[in-house]
Amino acid sequence: MAIPESLVDRIREQTDIAELIGEFIPLRKKGSDFDALCPFHNEKTPSFKVSPSKQIFHCFGCGLGGNVFSFLMHHEKMSFVEAVRFLADRLRIEIPAFSAGKGELDREKLYDANSFALKYFRWVLESDSGAKARGYLESRKISQEMIGEFALGYAPDQWDSFFSAAREKGWSPKYLQAAGLIKAKTDGGFYDSFRNRLMFPISNVVGKVIGFGGRTLGDDPAKYINSSGSAVFEKGQQLYGLRQSRNGIRSAGHVIVVEGYIDLIRLYSEGLENVVAPLGTALTSAQAKLLSRYTNEVVLLFDSDEAGRKAAKRALGECMTGALDTRVALLPPGKDPDEFLVEEGIEAMRALINASPDGIDFVVAEAKEAGRFDSPSRRAEALREILEIVTRASDPLVRDGHFRKLSERTGIEEKVIRQEANRGTSRPSVRGEDEVRLGSKTSFSYSQVEDDLLRLLIEDGDLAQKVKEEISLDEFEPGPQREILAYLYEKAPERVDPSSLFDRLESEETKTYLTRVLLVSPRFTHCEKAAVRDWIDSIRSHGMQLSAREVDQKLKEAEQRGDMATMKKLLARKTELVRASRNLVPTGQGIVLPD
């Protein structure tokens, strides 16, 4: 049994789409609607529109649109059922048990397995077995408040302590292993993936635990390890601390990226609540894209050793791809963020961040300090390396500004820099594999007036009933309009909720068309019966034109064959079409168009 449709409708109706989307991206009030920079593609001018009255959103840049469920599905990579459950939890609506598909069941089980592990690790940290971990946290100045805020825990120094506890609670090894919490022994049985490690739960932005990071408290050469990849966790796609910091990022207007979990928590505890960290790897393009949903400005706070400088340059390239304005703050030699905080204090840290140079100034200064501008050949080599970063900027206007700044900072003519960029550097695609490719122009071409009239039929069930009585679906060309009308005809004279209609549509093209047509400003102020008649006649006229073209083509073929009998039939058919079309003379009344 699936989730009852009536319950899905109730959850959809009780969720304010503007309030929901506003939790993920900044929205700006514009009349009765809201607009924003689209979170699904890179842009500088807002083209993303949210309508609380219609309970839908649409981006006029990339073409993606939908309702509260589809927003979560695209933005948070949830399945439909996960989106329904998430919103039900927000509304405190209980969803009865139902039979889920295998993939859906597996994902829920992985979330539950990670949730159980979180509780277990937290319990161990507070027990006698967690004394060493508590001592370590105290030495790093991690308060009880921060331990709770980030739900830190401890995996004991035993081979199967967690697995034994999970088995006692009835957990199947299948899901524990799939979540990366246990591993199979070569001779049978299982052992814990995390042992003698301080545990950092990794959550998605809606609060579900998707994996863990673990720092060794012993002599394991692997200082940090993360959960293995699973159906709910891929470390290159997530950021540690984003769940806690997303509101702080919006408030500050920028995000600070650090390399370590402890560094993040220390900064957060000192009031810098706009900080995130990659999951033990270099910053990826997917993580940069994730950050662009919350801000367009990034500060990379890295160590000043060779490894830190290289990491900063790699991260700068990914931020360029994500259309992020990026600055680089390097710590004094030999210091990590935690040590700098202890010795210099939070105000010194703020000053360091505020004084950080932008990415172009950083990479040019790096090259000059290394003596790479001392000879023509080394200067050319350094410029090409810098261009590999700069040309990853996804916005051509931003890229243009970088070229000018490079010329100013290096003394190399801007023309030469542009020639080298065009000749020697190819820019990778800035689109992710899952990015929408619909574009603002769709493959269908209905007139604005027809769009407006369809919008009226959605809003007026009685009018939809009248049109249904006048013209059958067979008289419409196959496509988005016909698919929408089929549902409107089925429900007429009942008024259809646009957000509910969205979930009933099959074609992605039709869903895109629906949200677009509903959020475009109408070109007329009212519609009378004569306007509906004009619309019906125009549809029939269009159909007759297509039929006439088909007849003309067949006439030509029959003439070439010398088939007089077929030609006679086709000429009679064409005469019928001409006579019928003469009866379709639009009145032009009832639609008030702008001048």
Image (tube, rainbow, N blue to C red):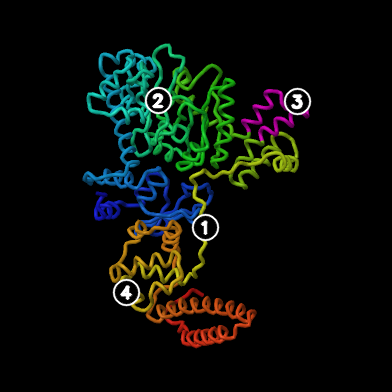
Q: Which residues are magenta?
A: 361-386
Q: What is the distance, in whole Å, between disc 2 and disc 4 at their CAs? A: 59 Å
- Image quadrant in which you'd find residue 173: top left
N-terminal of the pair, mark 2 or mark 3, is 2
Check whether the beta carbons of the residues at disc 1 and disc 3 lie within 8 A of each other.
Answer: no
Q: Residue 335 vs residue 406: left or right?
A: left
Q: Residue 213: which numbered mark, if any?
A: 2
Q: Is residue 52 visible?
A: no
Q: Residue 465: which numbered mark, if any?
A: 4
Given this view, does label 1 or label 3 mark the residue nearer the observer?
1
Check whether the beta carbons of the residues at disc 1 and disc 2 lie within 8 A of each other.
Answer: no
Residue in front for this viewpoint, 356 or 559: 559
| Residue with the mark numbered 3 | 374
N-terminal of the pair, mark 4 or mark 3, is 3
N-terminal of the pair, mark 1 or mark 3, is 3
Q: What is the distance, in whole Å, between disc 2 and disc 3 at their CAs? A: 44 Å
Q: Residue 240 vs residue 190: left or right?
A: right
N-terminal of the pair, mark 2 or mark 4, is 2
Residue in front for this viewpoint, 531 or 28: 531
